[in-house]
Amino acid sequence: MLKQIAYHKVTTGNEAQDIALNGITTNNPHLIIVNNVTVTSAGIFDIFINKSGSKDSTSDIGISWQKLEDDGSFQEFGNAMGNQTMIRFTDSMGSSNDGVCNATMMCYEMQSTSNYKYFTMNVSSTTSGGSLVGYQQGAIKSTTDACDGFTFNTNSSGGGFADGSTFALYEVV
């Protein structure tokens, strides 16, 4: 069963480059669902882990992903532990409906003070060029500090995440 912890839907006039969802208070698994995420001008879409309600920019994340494109090409990528401050959902998003992202992300050990944080992601998006892209990812944040949420970030300079973009955080109970 899923229990909604936090939800945010971007509306016209309230576009932002950072959207924070906090409220994790248990060590149960948590699920993030993002739906119809677009940006106001071309940009990327990242997620930061929050500690004490604020974005943690410590370089302690390692990732591995595979990017599959609709033309049959693919790319594999890994970044050793301690080389990243965030996890990338997708890049090369165009403006408004030119680039759309939908994703799920499972999160484990978020409140643990003795274990690292683990994440698995499934991402489907379209790029600014109209290509369909899928990402399968895994990540580890090598901290034993309790983490209580996430900040979604874009470098889109025209205002940020666009109208209709939705972000939800659930606890698996």
Image (cartoon, helix red, strand yellow):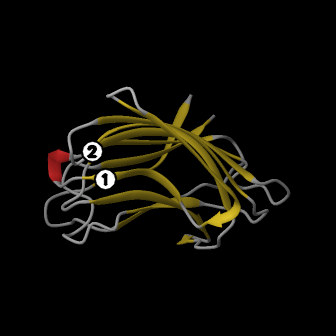
- Name which residue lies at 20% across and 39% down: 130
Q: What element carries label 1?
A: strand
Residue 151 placement (x, y as % from top left): 47, 63
- Name which residue lies at 66% across and 61% down: 147
Residue 111 placement (x, y as % from top left): 72, 56
Residue 76 visible in the shown view: yes
Q: What element carries label 2?
A: loop
Residue 8 visible in the shown view: no
- Name which residue lies at 55% across and 62% down: 86
Residue 10 placement (x, y as % from top left): 25, 56
Check disc 2: other Cα within 10 Å, few if <14, some if 14-19, many if 20+: many
Quick check: 35 left or right of 4?
left
**Which quadrant holds the C terminus?**
top right
Residue, disc 2: 127
Going from the N terminus, do you reach mark 1 or mark 2 first?
1
Q: Distance between the residues labelled 1 and 2?
A: 5 Å
Q: Looking at the image, which is closer to me, 109 or 98?
A: 98
* Picture quadrant of residue 81: bottom right
For badge 1, the amino acid type reads Ser
Quick check: 146 left or right of 107?
right
Residue, disc 1: 92
For the image shown, how many numbered marks are present on the structure? 2
The reply to whether dot 1 and dot 2 touch (C-beta < 8 Å) is: yes
